[in-house]
Image: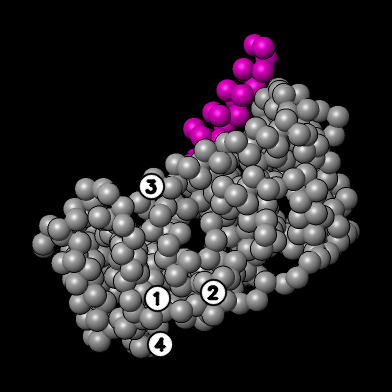
Amino acid sequence: MRARMLSVALLVVACVCGALAWFVFRAPQEGPAYARVATVTTPLGLKAYLVSDDTLPVVSMKVLFQAGSIYDPADRRGTANLLSTLFDEGAGDMDALAFQSRLEDLAVSLDFSVNRDNLSVSLRTTTDTLDEAFEMLRLALCEPRLDPDAIERMRAAILASIRLDSGDPSSIATNALFGKVFGTHPYAFDEKGTDESVRSLGRDDLLAFLKARVSRENLAIGVAGDISAGQLAVLLDRTFGPLPETASGPEVPAPQPVFDGSVTRVPFNVPQSTALLMQPGLLRPDPDWHAFYLLNYVMGGGGFNSRLMEEVREKRGLAYSVYSALYPFDKVGVWLVGTATENSGMPRSLLVIKEEWTRMATSGPTARELEDAKTYLTGAWPLSFTSTGSVASMLASMRLLDLPPDYIVKRNDIVSGLTLEDLERVRKRVMDPALLTGVVVGP
């Protein structure tokens, strides 16, 4: 027990206390470690982005499978989510308790989660247990037990979460808005599924989804830490080699969202109303993405530096929080606006949001707003890489989007080179106040 506690403590110290030093405080002539991205191609043809550095004995890996909830069968919503909770609930000859105990003994962190597009896997380990950590991941993905007691335990936890969401105004608004805009398309449905659909799921449904979607064809891998390209290539083939080579099952078509400009009220007896609005956005690979990202920062993504916060909260005191955010899903991009305020103030808040949306769509940002946004976004960029985990996550996203390995280095130059003309082109192309479609949850 004492050895186990010591190994866990060492991992925490290495990953948390030393992470910033590993990536930021390096000799100037070497440059930041996170900028040295190598492409690793394995004998099986798997590709990964790797930032290799031996400063700390820690390795993190992020894996993204295109196996999110949009691939759930129409009558089995919540399949991907339930499956994601079961990968570490027993694998191979180890039941749930034995599997979790083994992870603890090795001081290995292994996490699984699902969103609409992807199944996400996060692995973190020290170099002393590198081989064992990858073997635990192989067992989880390739030999999950899916024991009946584990299924029922995870099902109960998900059903409890669904019940909690049914009383949460933000969750209600999100589900109502996505249902309103996307109709019957898979993007309309919450990853967790419904009470009815989750209760109907069986072991065969989980195995069928696993076989169909978790394959070598549709994964993206990012790795950072004390590991060489040669070591990684061997471990990747050993870990993911047993998976099916290709995915199967019907493809999910791009949605045809409906933005009719209306706002629907969802009755809910609370003292504070919650509103969400949505209009079309851009896909992440779009050439105008960075200009769009900057435009959103000025509009509502910049916190207290944004127009919406200035006009809705600071000048008028109508809401504590108001924001905008970009959602570049795999098959559609949307632009979301959200606020919450006491019930009597919601109509005025929505009116001001619409007015500001119209003003930005008509005249665009000022030169000062543009420069302030570029200063912040370029200055904050290195802070995205303060741990092996954060670097691995960025690298996996880059692989998923097929961004070049030098994107990390070039990104700030792209942002710095944006002009008012670039933002004018994007606002004319994208912004349309008449399309802002929303829901308000409140009495």
Which of the two discs, 2 and 3, labels the residue nearer the N terminus? 3
435 left or right of 269 in image:
right
- Asked whether residue 14 is drawn in magenta, I would say yes
Q: For mark 4, what is the residue?
A: 429
Which of the two discs, 2 and 4, labels the residue nearer the N terminus? 2
Q: Disc 4 to disc 1, how far (Cα)?
A: 12 Å
Q: For mark 3, what is the residue?
A: 168
Callout 4–callout 3 Cβ contact below 8 Å: no
Q: Secondary structure at mark 4?
A: helix
Image quadrant for the N terminus? top right
Q: Secondary structure at mark 2?
A: loop
Q: Disc 2 to disc 4, how far (Cα)?
A: 16 Å
- Amino acid type shown at disc 3: Asp
- Amino acid type shown at disc 1: Gln
Q: For mark 2, what is the residue?
A: 332
Foreground mark, 1 or 3, reads 3
Q: Which residues are magenta?
A: 1-21
Residue 245 % position (x, y): 86, 61
